[in-house]
Amino acid sequence: MIVVDKRKYKMAINEAAKEVHVQVHGLIREEDAEEYMIDLQDTINRVPRQAYTFVIDATHQTPTPSRVVPQMEQALQFYATLGFKEFLVVKPSSKIAQVQIRNLLERIEFTGTFVDHVPRSM
């Protein structure tokens, strides 16, 4: 069930699979960040986090300008603190973005899983 469907991002809850999916298209700009965080909080508050998997679908993530990398790192650290049973990050189709995200995940000592794709998507 899609909960949020905006131009830059989508958020969905798959109750059967016990997953919360977040998909970002391109890059969340500073002016969109506040609305994104409100939508994220509303979405994740609908489920018992300890029983659900949190999936960041970065398939459509574009390469990130170096000035934005620190914010992306903060976002990934924040996601890791949300208390979900499991945390998956789907690799971007862009090889450059894939390397950027992999490097960020290593820096934050990511304990989730970096996957090629999720069989169930939005």
Image (cartoon, rainbow, N blue to C red):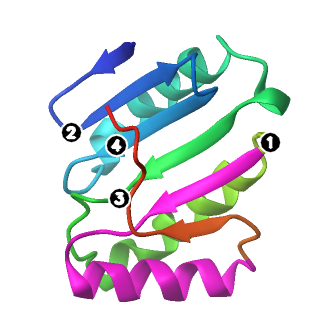
Inspect the image, locate mark 2, and give the three-letter code of the amino acid beneath it: Lys
Q: Name the residue under label 3.
A: 58
Q: Distance between the Cα atoms at labels 2 and 3?
A: 12 Å
Q: What label does residue 8 carry, if any?
A: 2
Above or below, 94 relative to 80: below
Q: Tell whether position 105 is magenta.
A: yes
Inspect the image, locate mark 1, and give the three-letter code of the amino acid beneath it: Lys
Q: What label does residue 23 carry, if any?
A: 4
Inspect the image, locate mark 3, and give the three-letter code of the amino acid beneath it: Ala
Question: In the image, 64: left or right of 119?
Answer: left
Q: In which quarter of the image is residue 53?
A: top right
Question: In the image, 101: left or right of 73?
Answer: left
Q: What label does residue 85 carry, if any?
A: 1
Nearer to us: label 1 or label 2: 1
Q: Do the residues labelled 2 and 3 touch (CB within 8 Å)?
A: no
* Secondary structure category for the residue under label 4: strand
Q: Which residue is drawn at 78% across and 49% down?
A: 81
Tell me which numbered mark, 1 or 3, is placed earlier along the sequence: 3
Q: Position of residue 105 (x, y in %)?
A: 60, 78
Tell me which numbered mark, 4 or 2, is placed earlier along the sequence: 2
Tell me which numbered mark, 1 or 2, is placed earlier along the sequence: 2
Magenta range: 86-109
Nearer to us: label 1 or label 3: 1
Tell me which numbered mark, 4 or 3, is placed earlier along the sequence: 4
* Secondary structure category for the residue under label 3: loop
Q: Distance between the Cα atoms at labels 4 and 3?
A: 6 Å
